[in-house]
Image: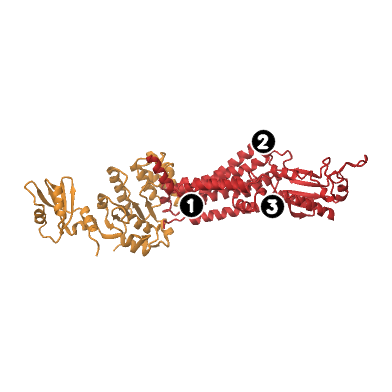
Amino acid sequence: MTELVVDAQGLTRDFGSKRAVDALDLKIERSMIYGLIGPNGSGKTTAMRMLTGLLTPTEGTADVLGIRIPQRAETLKRRIGYMTQSFSHYRDLTVLENLRFAADIYGLSRRDKMRRVDDLLAHYALQGFADQLAGSLSGGQRQRLALAAAVVHKPDLLFLDEPTSAVDPESRRSFWEQLFDLVDGGVTMIVSTHFMDEAERCHKIAILDKGRKRADDAPQTLMKNIKASVVEIEGPGLRDIKHALDALKEIQSVAQIGARLRVLVDAAVSDPIATVGKAAKFNADTALELVKPNLEDVFVMATKDDPP
Amino acid sequence: MAILRKELLQLRRDRLTFGMVIMIPLIQLVLFGYAINTNVRHIPAAVVDQSDTGLSRALIQIVEATQVVEFTQRFATIEEAEIAIIRSDVRAALIIPNDLAQRVVRNPAVVGTLPSEPDRPVGRPVAQWLVDGSDTVIAASVKSLRNMPLAELFRRPANTGTPTFEVALYYNPEQRSAVNIVPGLVGIILTMTMIMFTSAAIVRETERGNMEMLINTPVKPVELMIGKIIPYIVIGFVQAAIILGLGYFIFDVPINGSLATLFLLILLFILASLSLGLVISTIAKNQLQAMQMTIFVLLPSILLSGFMFPYEGMPKAAQYIADVFPATHFVQGIRGVVLREATLAEIDVDALWLLGFTIVGVAAASLRFRKNLD
């Protein structure tokens, strides 16, 4: 087993009477992108803030890069980068000034600073905007600036809090390419997201819901091991069929996607097509098909039932 | 109608604005009505009794009975009294000459008529007042004693031919109010701008989301605080230079003291104001609140610091409140340096107080500012 970058046991955090994160165990290995997947309010950001030392856990312990937090959080801060959900650099400074500021904050020497800032401008395709105010950048450009600023000190571990919630799909693609370049260089990343396509790009994910971890593994493994069969129904009267299926207890979930219904059937059911077909009382126009589960199905299954 | 209702709902939730609506008229009323008194009484004064006779002691008593002055200190020599004035421990000093008895005999305030002997000098004032004339209100109050009847001493009517006292106005003999106002204005302007600059400093980072990035970096709270203060020091000096420079060229306000002392005093005051702003900044939740709190500091600074109304004219309670504000110490100090040629040794208390205020302020701001979100 490779070295653990994050080793958290029983991390718990209460805000007043509300438990935001409940007994979270995380083991994250080096050089991978680890996704924290969950709906809003599932505790992703709270979990991240505990791992960076911004929040003190109510219970539990965590070692990040071998550093015990939150006790030694200040030591840790030199070795991690954090990219916030909303753009948190200075809009009234230029791209170049923002990067130099970040370099100064992390105490880079004058020569290192100049070289590093030049490298970053080149690598993140920001040279053309070096003297432009950060506030006037587009979403994708801002995001590249934020990433460049977050890695100015070459951190070993990078936290990205919903990094692509404000950018177009094209920028998102190239952004992930840059993340994989960083991983190739030995950086470990923790990414929070509620986009399934982003989750699928992670090496490993943990699904969080109401502060609890419901599942964690590689996305492919999770899809393979899903405890349900997926049946898609195409035809007329889909709303009626959905209501009929909702009443059955072996049907885990029914969701309409465009002109089709996606039905998750309990894995214990041996012939899911027949079960769904009987319940749907379909006519000749209706087509049923067994399809491969996707990550959203995994997510639905994981967050559906209450844990034991 | 919909807007009106929404506005009222928001106003009710905004405690600070609500507080301002109530507190500002309240504070103003109390300050103007109770604390501010242009008819100054109990001016702290010193006495140098060179004759030290029953007669001089009686004189001191009847002067004190007027309640205009209160003798808080006694000195053996005139020099000591002058230093006390420079230090602004006292605002005036009564010098009783050792030939008091002879002077009294000839003073028309006592004899009632001018002595007839032509070869003898005309009656002289029985004693002399040395007055810090920089504040015209104080000076006027002491001057009102000039023709005080000494009749009580001898039960005779007063005569105004020769004054009872000779009054020497120091520092501002022509009694121009600009002389007193210009140095004080430095204090008010700096209070306003310095506190305003920094009170918004931390809040702005939070409001714009920059704070989330900063707290994830190895920046230390003290570094952040000090880094926020330093740029504004220069701005403060520019402002002080403009006010004092224009005061010098347009209003003929002299700068009697040494520039080095002046520089140091202004530096201390700028630091104190900036650190006060920082403390506000760590308390305020947004920039509007920061602005409102700045006004809360600014109002008493203008009214109580001695800038507009003499500090001595305020009741004790108001003086204690005034002492909390850096502006009070600064206005006292800068008037000392600019008008009375005070050196650092003579404004040590005010200077130390400003220094202490700064240290406490920066420490409080750094402690209040947490790098975590607990």
Judging from the image, what is the letter of the chain drawn in red? B
**Of helix, strand and loop, which one carries label 1?**
helix
Tell which subunit mark 3 falls on.
B
The answer to whether residue A186 is visible is no
Instruction: Of the two numbered discs 1 and 3 on the same chain, state the one appearing first in sequence.
Output: 1
Give percent across and percent down for residue A274.
8, 56
Cα distance between the residues tagged 1 and 3: 36 Å
Q: Residue B345, labelled with which disc?
A: 3
Q: Is residue A239 left or right of residue B43?
A: left
**Number of labelled discs?**
3
Measuring 86% from the left and 48% from the top, which residue is drawn there?
B104
**Of helix, strand and loop, which one carries label 2?**
helix
Give percent across and percent down for residue B41.
70, 48
Residue sitting nearer the eye, B323 or B59: B59
Disc 1 marks which amino acid?
Answer: Ile
Are the residues under badges 1 and 3 in a single subunit?
A: yes
**Of helix, strand and loop, which one carries label 3?**
helix
Disc 3 marks which amino acid?
Answer: Ala
Cα distance between the residues tagged 3 and 2: 28 Å
Instruction: Of the two numbered discs 2 and 1 on the same chain, state the one appearing first in sequence.
Output: 2
Give percent across and percent down for residue A285.
8, 46
Instruction: Of the two numbered discs 3 and 2 on the same chain, state the one appearing first in sequence.
Output: 2
Q: Report which residue position mark 2 lands on.
A: B251
Q: Residue B283, labelled with which disc?
A: 1
Above or below, A2 against B301 in this view is below
Judging from the image, what is the letter of the chain drawn in orange? A
Cα distance between the residues tagged 2 and 1: 41 Å
In the picture as drawn, the residue positioned furthest to the top comes out as B250
Residue sitting nearer the eye, A196 or B45: B45
Measuring 78% from the left and 53% from the top, which residue is drawn there?
B61
Image depth: mark 1 or mark 3 in front: 1
